[in-house]
Image: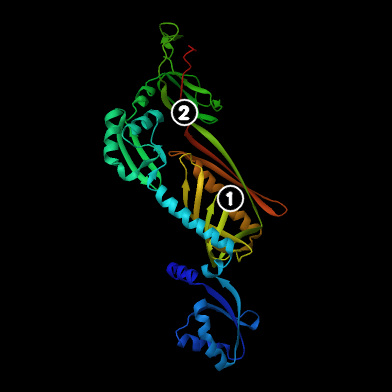
Amino acid sequence: MALSLISRTYHGYIEVEFHGDNSVRLVQAAADAGLTIWRLRRPQGVLTGWMLARDFAQLRPLVRRYRVRVRIIRRRGLPFRLREPHRQAVLMGMVIFVGLLYILGSFIWYIELSGLDQIPANTVLLVLREAGLRPGALKRAIDPGEVEHHLLSRIPLLSWAGIEWRGTRAIVQLVEKADQSWIIDSMEPADLVAAKAGRIQTLIVLAGKPMVKEGDLVTEGQVLIRGEPPDLDFFGRTVPPPGWPPKAIRARGMVRATVTYDLKAEVPWELSYLVRTGATAQRSIVTVGARSLVLTGRDEIPFAEWQEERASLVWRDHQGRLLAELSSVTYYEVERITEDLGPGGARSEAEAIVRRDFGAILVPGALIVSQTVETEELSHATAVRLVVEVIEDIAESRLRNPSRP
């Protein structure tokens, strides 16, 4: 299909009209003679079709035989475009430009680093320059394996390095050695605070001083278990732990609370959305600077409404600025569909939305206690409210402020 389109564009193709009672017989005779006519249509009672421009002359004996009048109504392809002087200049410029791109494509103009967290990017770029990888370097003069080995030997914090070429870019993928700071973080003093508001149902303290009790209402961010030793029970009396200020520790425990979720959704009784009809059109476009030229396909998109998918090949300079872009664009015709849901359908759709949203925020291990669905009919829509009570663990660690006791 793609090769056929390229061949037609190269040789040129035309759309013709067939006027006469024997139009269909002429087209059949042309097919028997080896001529290809495609996209036959009969808009407003006139038979039309597309054929190669070079085959048009072979229609003359058939036209005389069947007494059919043929008229060319559209021309497409390079032979017709190149007849215009300004398009010849554009084509010559494109040939020169493509040649320059081919030459410039043999060099590295941009280096992209990925995977860095602790190591400064300038350090890696300096080591790459030592190995010969820098903007302006010839690709075939660089051995990626040697550059990778040089990186690992010069930067001890790296555990792996990989280099690949993507056009004029060098993609340098790096993996740093594992960071052990999370072990230190897990030992630092911290409080357990409420991640959500709720009523405490279960409080289990493994380490730290409890600041709430079962049955209490807590707000988001409130301290549940403080990261310090608990008070001591001395013969029925509560006394503080020895030493002041108390030594900070990391609070541990489980705090399960009843949390209420309130979700709402509103759906109109009449929905409007776009659906693809199946008709498509394609264009190839080259863009240089602010100028664009359609290489293949129609200059105007033949649809009133459409969606497009674009695949592009982009050339940029070492600063990331766009030099040129070659795009293949597929246009899909769409039509607007209106669906009448009615109050019942809108209610079902709105309830499905709120339940889907609730499932997305429900934490693992949570226990649903109760749920209520409320429906409200508006002027042209239906609103649904879902209220769910859940028992879940709301405790999360928060490092203690070292300035506070």
Crowding at mark 1 (Cα within 10 Å: few <14, some 14-19, many 20+): few
Front-most of 236 and 40? 40
Residue at the spot of label 1: 290
Marks 2 and 1, the one that precedes in the sequence: 1
- The reply, left or right, for residue 384 in relation to residue 161 is right
Residue at x 49% of width, y 12% of height: 403
Secondary element under disc 2, as helix, strand or loop, is strand
Picture disc at residue 395 = 2
Of circles 2 and 1, which is in front?
A: 1
Query: Which residue type carries mark 2?
Result: Ala
The answer, for residue 276, to whether it is visible in the render is yes
Q: Is residue 305 above or below residue 179?
A: below
The answer, for residue 310, to whether it is visible in the render is no
Front-most of 290 and 225? 290
Residue 135 in picture, x, y percent from top left: 40, 38
Front-most of 41 and 397? 41
| Gap between marks 2 and 1 measured at Cα | 57 Å
